[in-house]
Structure formats: structure tokens, C-alpha cells
Image (cartoon, grey):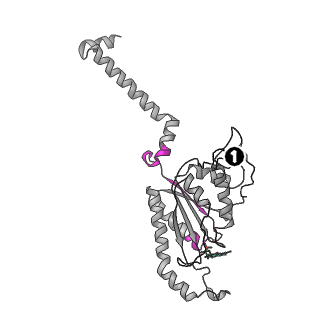
Amino acid sequence: MRIFAFLFHTKMDRREFLKKAALGVAAVAATSLLEHPVVAAANEMINPQKNNRMKKIMIIDGGPRRNMNTAAMLESFANGAKEGGAEVKTVRLYDLDYKGCISCMACKLKGRASNICKFKDSLTPVLEEIAEADGLVLGSPIYFGDVTGQMRTFLERLAFPWLSYNDYSITAPKRMPVVLVETMNGTPARNNSNGYGTMEHCLSTALAKPERLIAYNTYQVKDYSRYELAGFSEEAKRKYREEHWEEDLQKAFEAGKRMAGE
Ligand SMILES: Cc1cc2nc3c(=O)[nH]c(=O)nc-3n(C[C@H](O)[C@H](O)[C@H](O)COP(=O)(O)O)c2cc1C
């Protein structure tokens, strides 16, 4: 009290003191509100970079071969994303033991509906990590016109919990940029790819309109002379590869860098 009385008499009148005190209380309240864990988490979701947290990009490789075309495109994307300052995690679906949606309907239970799949297997931690990521990249070779069975199976588990059977809205835990990578024998002029098919609509609605990266006319084997592949001209393949492959990898690299900076 003595301090207050001293302030009134010496530096400011009562009204000015009360104004300053109120401003001080508001500033302290605002600071503690920003530090509140719920507000901080929401703020970080809106803009992770503002909070100096590295962006986390999840790359899902739906191809079986470790060192061939799809893996190379995804690795180039990862290198670009890392150069752009993002943290990258690559998951190889063929290394995991999981099922597609088993229609248990646990994600749609009354009062306990979830937009992350409730069925527990080795895909569970991947789905949980994607829910918190800042970007998603899917890669698959084209098999019989579609993505691989492994990729499709993964997508069932990812997207079914996003779909509301109450109003048919599609909502993921968090929106984020998406890149879809395809590699195939087909050429830009002649191919049978349906890409990610109907799943592309789910990804678009729930996360963001995907950017597509396609490597056409890839080398299916390293040495055509060792296989019964007479339907392909290795010479034509080599020519196409020399003209396009490095450019395809570069496009993947640039897309990675872009996603890191988004
Ligand atoms: C089972 C199987 C089915 C395939 N079906 C197609 C197809 O329908 N259209 C196509 O353009 N390429 C097809 N391909 C070729 C692959 O898509 C192509 O070689 C791809 O780049 C392989 O990716 P990877 O090198 O990452 O394994 C098929 C390959 C396999 C093994």
C-alpha cells in the first residue's frame, strides 16, 4: 500500500496508475494464455515453422523394390525436402505386416468415432504419425493400371475413418500438402494408369489437392538381355531414360524442397 501511495504522489495520478495496471494484467494474461499447452499446440498446428519446429513429411513407399524406380523417385523427393529443412520419414509398406480395412466399424462407434483407424497392427503407428505430420507423399509403381495392392490396402485404412456416414463429409485430423508419385512402363502418350483412382478424391477433400509426379517408361529391369521381354525395345527404353530420368528425379527433388517450404 505504501508503494502505491508513493506512486500516486510522485509519478502518476490514480487514473493513470489504474490504466497502466490494467494493461499490465492483460499483458501477463495474454502471455500465459499463449503459453498454455492447448493454445501452443493449436498455434503450432497452424504454423509449425513460426515455432521453429521442423516440418515433418511422411513418405509412404508402396513399391516392393528397394532400389528401383519408385524408391529412387521417393529418395530424391526426400533429399529435396531435407535440403528445404524438413524432417523426413520414409515407410516401406512391403516391410510391414498389415491388413486393409476389416470393416470392424470401430471408427464409427457412437460417441467414440475416430478419424484414425482403430484396428491395431503394424500400420497403427504409421497412421498415427501421418495424423500429426505436415506433409504426405505416396509412391507406387502402376500394376495392371492401378497402384499396388499394398498401397490400396494402406489407403483403405487411412481414408475410411475420414468418411462420415452421418453426412458423407470427409475430414482428416489435419490438412497437409500431398504429393502422389507413380512410375510405370506406359508413356505420356500411351498408358493405362488410373493413378490413385477414387482415393485421389478422398485425399483431395481431406488433406489438400495432390500434386502428381509421374515417371513414365521406366526401366523395369537393369539388363533387358537377361529376361523374356522382347515386347520392349531396350534401345528405345534407354533413349527415353537418357532424355527423361534425371529430369524426373530433379522434379521430385524440387517438389520435396517446395513441400518443406510450404
Ligand atoms: C505386376 C506388375 C504389373 C504391372 N502393370 C503395369 C501396368 O499396368 N502399366 C504400366 O505402365 N506398367 C506396369 N508395370 C510396370 C511397372 O509399373 C514399372 O516397371 C514400374 O516403374 C516399376 O516400379 P519399381 O521399379 O519401383 O518396382 C507392371 C509391373 C508389374 C511387376
Tell whether 255 sits left or right of 143: left
The boundaries of the magenta stretch are: 44-72
In magenta stretch: residue 68: yes
- Quadrant where the C terminus sits is bottom left
Q: Is mark 1 on a helix, strand or loop?
A: helix
Residue 61 place in picture, x, y as percent? 61, 64
Q: How many labels does the image show?
A: 1
Look at the image and say whether residue 57 sits in the magenta stretch. Answer: yes
Location of the N terminus by quadrant is: top left
Is 11 located above or below residue 82 in the figure? Answer: above
Q: What's under tag 1, amino acid-wise?
A: Cys
| Residue 44 image point, x, y percent | 48, 44
Q: Mark 1 points at which residue?
A: 107
Q: Where is residue 62 in the image (x, y as percent from the top left)?
A: 63, 65
Q: Which residue is drawn at 50% across and 65% down?
A: 77
Vertical placement of 110 versus 235: above or below? Answer: above
Q: In this view, does 98 lie to the left or right of 173?
A: right
Q: In this view, does 191 lie above or below 173?
A: below
Q: Identify which residue is drawn at 58% across, 47% down.
A: 173
